[in-house]
Image (tube, helix red, strand yellow):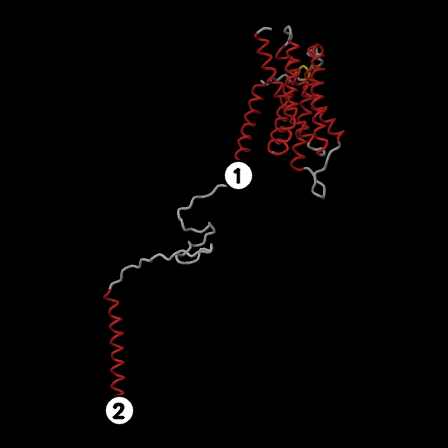
Amino acid sequence: MSTDLIVGFFTLTALEIVLGIDNLVFISILAGKLPEHQRARARQIGIALALVGRLVLLASITLIMRLTVPLFTIAGIEFTGQSLILLAGGLFLIAKATYEIHESLEGEEDHKGSKVRAAFGAVLLQIVALDLVFSLDSVITAVGMIGDEPGGIWVMVAAVVIAVIVMLVSAGPLSRFVNAHPTVKMLALSFLLLIGFTLVAEGLHFHVPRGYIYFAMGFSLFVELLNIFARRRRKAQPVKLNSRYADSSSGDGSAPVAAGHSTGTGTDTPAEPVATPATDPTPSAGPSAGGSSGSDGGSSGGSDGGGGGGGD
């Protein structure tokens, strides 16, 4: 096996894992419409169909590579079998993502408040259609990367099988994570829109480097994971404002607890000596003297009056 083929194998495996996880996310979103006891079964069927679809398309790799013959031309754009498949798949993904976003944000619920459940057969048909589109995208990506190198078919098969194994292992945890975080679900549906537009562009022969697409998706997911972590920290450790005053109340805007009064906890705080400002003795002596003089005058007047009465 050549070095280029080994590098192509690891690169293709990484791309297939990304596409497989995208496929699994949308399978989980569709399976979330079913009752709880049917979701695991729908996911298992969806993953099995994804593997079968990819292997069947890889087995017919010769036919896929022959779909590059122009069928007709419109406005200078040649339409081949591959381009028509990409256009149909891209338009389907765009329509499906738009519908799911609308249903998630403005979907109807029954009068009892429980979500309306979809039929198992209808959900399974949607999963089959999604698997077909992602399988075509996966195989066309593999063909474009590996080409017709000797032993390339086995490299593509190995990459696809590894990606499906990753899907099987991460199906349960990833499904629970997506259903528990609505923002991640919206982000996944946005990825579906992005992939749909990419397929339409490639169907019209406008090549979009997959590295740009996957980098944008990875960066968006990284930012969303940071937001989830930040929300969890805010819930676990609520923010508290520091107070400059040790005796301030609990933050309701009331005055500090007065010294010598009960704090409401069953114990009285000891009264602290209150320092009063020093007063000038001169002004206070006047009233005191006047008061004493008045008292003396009153006593004197009383004595004189009593004496006069006794004389009479």
Quadrant of image for the C terminus:
bottom left
Quadrant of image for the N terminus:
top right
Q: What residue is at 75 percent from the left and 30 percent from the top? A: 120
Q: What residue is at 39 percent from the left and 58 percent from the top? A: 260
For residue 126, what is the image quadrant? top right
For the residue labelled by badge 1, is the local secondary structure a helix, a strand or a loop?
helix
Q: What residue type is labelled 2?
A: Gly
Q: Which residue position is annotated with label 1?
A: 236
Residue 149, horizontal then vertical, whole percent: 63, 7
| First in sequence: mark 1 vs mark 2 | 1
Most extreme residue toward the bottom is 312
Q: Give the vertical position of 217 relative to 261 (above or below).
A: above
The crowding category of the residue bearing disc 2, from other C-alpha atoms within 10 Å (few below 14, some 14 to 19, many at least 20), is few
For the residue labelled by badge 2, is the local secondary structure a helix, a strand or a loop?
helix
Q: What residue is at 66 percent from the left and 37 percent from the top? A: 106
Q: Which residue position is annotated with label 2?
A: 310
Residue 237, horizontal then vertical, whole percent: 50, 39
Give whichever of 108, 163 is nearer the camera.
Answer: 163
Most extreme residue toward the left is 282
Q: With 286 as the anchor, is 57 left or right in this view?
A: right
Identify the disc placed on residue 51: none
Q: Give the vertical position of 214 relative to 143 (above or below).
A: below
The crowding category of the residue bearing disc 1, from other C-alpha atoms within 10 Å (few below 14, some 14 to 19, many at least 20), is few
Q: With 192 as the anchor, is 248 left or right in this view?
A: left
Q: What residue type is labelled 1?
A: Ala
Q: What residue is at 24 percent from the left and 72 percent from the top? A: 289
Residue 235, horizontal then vertical, whole percent: 54, 39
Q: Give the vertical position of 104 relative to 260 (above or below).
A: above
Residue 275, horizontal then vertical, whole percent: 31, 57
Give whichever of 210, 3 is nearer the camera.
Answer: 3
